[in-house]
Amino acid sequence: MGVKIYFGGAEKGMYASMLLSAKVRRIGINLTHLAIPKKRQLDLRTKYENSELLVYTSEGDEDVGRYDAFLRAHADDLTLVIGRPDYDGTWLGEKYVPIWNDADDLERLNWICQRNGRVAISDKALTKHHHNRLNAIAMRWNAEMVGLTSKPDNIENYKWDAVLVNSWTSAVRYGETQVWTGHGLRRYPAQQKDSARKRHRVDIERLGVSYENVAADEVDAVSKLAIVSWKRYEEHIFGGYDTMTSTNQDASDDTESGDIIITPPHGGSLANVENRGTGIVIPPPEKRNENDRLLLPVIGVETITSMGSQTIDEHGESIEIAPEQTNVIRYSGVLLRQCDNCYLASKCPAFKEHAECAFKLPVEIRTKDQLQAALRAMIEMQVSRVMFARFAEELEGQGLDGTLSSEMDRAFDMIEKFKNINDTRDLVRFEVEARGSSGVLSRLFGQRAADQANALPYGGLGPSATDAFYQEVIDVEEEQ
């Protein structure tokens, strides 16, 4: 399982009993509200039945001495200790997780992640920054994150190693109904508890909780329903679809206005898939009006007008007939990037929260000069990579770097291609095939050109020269 959920509230005896009776073995304790006996030794292992314990304090707790004394007395029994800004708990080793709760001090978050490799983040700090930015900072330093939050968006969007959840206690304190439906964890306020419990009767019984006791508003049953539902949510938050989902549509598919819905990421099933026995029915997509369709922002369309046929009118003026207009696509320089969800947010020098990207890419290649400039820039970029790889090879001092060799080959390939693109030499090749009595040359250039081509070299003999030649030939038979 990717995330471990610790159930908070165990500092109170009633909540601790509810969690232990529901077989919960990861428990969160708020030391600020924990009653420590003065006359006898506190045995955490016995009190919490050898459960994994996460300890933290309220933000306004200023009693550092009590905090330090408790940790030194029970360090061996604790699994995770959420630190305080005014306390150095490095002596606890990997159990200690410093807290970051000042949303305006991102430098401290970077410092904690770099120095400790672990950080705890409260809801107060999560509200002011996009999750991609904080995830990127933690990934940069390969740091583990522990969340002090019960909000579903925060649980699902951050790369937590552990999360402390306190909202399950709302079922006891405020009369909420919290139930796992197989699709998600649904929370209903006290004003809707009667209709919600009737609707989810099958889900409640499937979770092993008495519906009659829940309908009677018994505290033990309502708390057990919330705890079991959160445990199922923990099991499926990074998993697939719950195969035990009820087939009763009235129990899980209808959502009233005002419902608080927690839905895990999609696993093996889609939220709009309706399960009816062995058949799966997917509703057809909603039709859109053509006026609602938009052009993709990354491309544009321009109109090119081609020349039509040219003619001369009766007044001797040139007229163009039937020019043709054609729509062609072009690259659009409009950027959709936003600083809040950019993966470079933690390193970008121009980062500005809730703002568009500060950079633009005005790329336009319409002429030969623009094409050559773009190709030349790419070659320069590649050569700079080769030089930097050479510098890295020298620093490493471990012999020849295969990556550098491949980058050099790539640079030569790019130069050769650039040369071929810029080669403007003309190459003309004729391939002619002729049939019939006439020759190829006579067909192309006329009979005179054919006669000259067929003449013997050095001029040959004309008609009169041929007759004179014959007269000079000696007839041997007549002389005899």
Image (cartoon, helix red, strand yellow):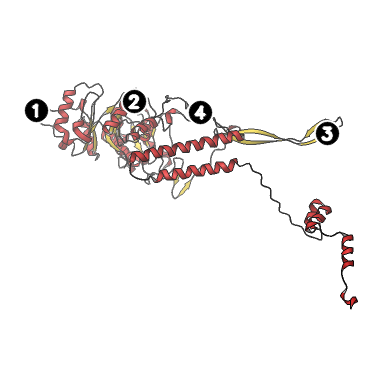
Question: CA gap, disc 2 to disc 1?
Answer: 44 Å
Mark 2 or mark 3, earlier in chain: 2
Q: Are marks 2 and 1 in contact (CB under 8 Å)?
A: no
Going by the numbered disc 3, the residue's amino acid type is: Ile
Picture quarter with the C terminus: bottom right
Return the residue at label 3: 312
| Distance in Å between CA atoms under marks 1 and 4 | 69 Å
Q: Residues within 10 Å of mark 1 (few under 14, many from 20)?
A: few
The amino acid marked with disc number 4 is Lys
The reply to whether residue 459 is in sight is: yes
Compared with 442, 234 (above or below) is: above
The percent position of residue 438, horizontal first and vertical second, equals 81, 58
Marks 4 and 2 sit apart, C-alpha to C-alpha, by 26 Å
Q: CA distance from mark 3 to mark 4?
A: 49 Å
| Disc 2/disc 3 C-alpha distance (Å) | 75 Å
Kindly state the secondary structure of the residue where label 3 is placed.
Answer: strand
- Label at residue 39: 1
Label 3 near label 1: C-beta < 8 Å?
Answer: no
Do tag 4 and tag 2 residues touch (Cβ < 8 Å)? no
Q: Position of residue 296 (x, y in %)?
A: 55, 34
> As rendered, which of 387 and 406 lies closer to the eye?
387
Q: In terms of depth relative to the viewer, which is nearer, 312 or 141?
A: 312
Q: Is residue 164 left or right of residue 372?
A: left
Mark 2 vs mark 1: which is more N-terminal? 1
Of badges 4 and 2, nearer the viewer stands 4
Q: Which residue is mark 4?
A: 360
Earlier-in-chain disc, 3 versus 4: 3
Q: Earlier in the sequence, mark 4 or mark 2?
A: 2
The disc label shown at residue 106, or none: 2
Q: Amino acid at mark 2?
A: Leu
Q: Residue drawn 90% across and 76% down?
A: 479
**Along the line of sight, the residue nearer the viewer: 174 or 333:** 333
